[in-house]
Image (cartoon, grey):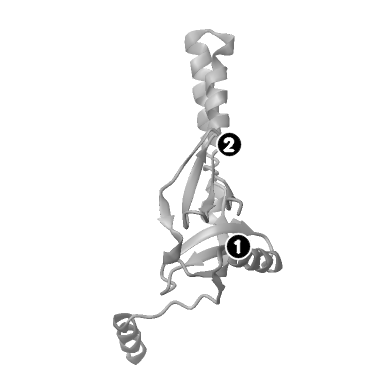
Amino acid sequence: MPSLQFSRSMGRIHTSFMVVPTFIIVAVLFVLITGYFFSWVPLLLSGLFFKLTSTGVDFDCDRDRFRQYTNYGGLWKRGEWKPLPHYPYITVLHRKLKSKFNSQYVLSHDDDIVWKVCYDVCLLSKTHRHKVPAMRLKSEEEALKEARKLAKLLDKDLTKYAPKISEATAKKKRKSRLK
């Protein structure tokens, strides 16, 4: 039987827009201080390194484990391996990601916040309290299709997200409703 190992990328890590002006200022100061025309090359290479940094999940079905990783500049992956049996379920979660630009105008106008809707295919623990995002997709249909594929590959149950509420939490909710 062939080895079953595969990887799912969650995407690039994006930094704040304030990094760009800071990068330009540092680059200009470096050129002015050193006097070298090609002194911007190390800054450019470090910027590319961070731009190419991404996250994702690796699955190793032969050893029944997975890891969430960060891929640094496309050169190496880093992440701790965890056992797959602790996550018997797979689900699709609806997410709203908030994005806003750093400016004085936006600080005074909440209308400029951009909401992006996406769907995460996640591994779930038995109690549904621990979630591990395996992939992020733009449409619900595509996410459900990928979740079915992943459930079949990993021999997991596809389920609806429904975390069990502890007795202490239920008690707090009852108290707050009485007020």
Instruction: Establish if 113 lies above or below 91.
Output: above
Q: In front: mark 2 or mark 1?
A: 1
Instruction: From the image, tell me which residue sits under label 1.
Output: 153
Question: Front-most of 77 and 166?
Answer: 77
Residue 100 on image: x %, y %: 56, 52
**Element type where label 1 sits in the image:** helix
* Quadrant assignment, res 1: bottom right
Give me the disc on residue 25: none
User: Is any atom of residue 114 visible in this view?
Assistant: no
Amino acid of disc 1: Leu
Q: Are marks 2 and 1 in contact (CB under 8 Å)?
A: no
Which residue is at a point 56% across and 24% down the rendered structure image? 45
Which residue is at a point 61% across and 51% down the rendered structure image? 2
Q: Is residue 165 left or right of residue 16?
A: left
Which residue is at a point 44% across and 46% down the rendered structure image? 79
Q: Residue furthest front?
A: 1
Question: Front-most of 50 and 162?
Answer: 162
Instruction: From the image, tell me which residue sits under label 2.
Output: 52
Identify the mark nearer the N-term, 2 or 1: 2
**How far apart, in angstroms, are the residues tagged by discs 2 and 1?**
29 Å
Residue 150 on image: x %, y %: 61, 63
User: Is any atom of residue 96 visible in this view?
Assistant: yes
Residue 125 on image: x %, y %: 43, 69
Badge 2 crowding class, 10 Å Cα cut-off, few under 14, some 14 to 19, many 20 or more, is some
Instruction: Establish if 48 lies above or below 35.
Output: below
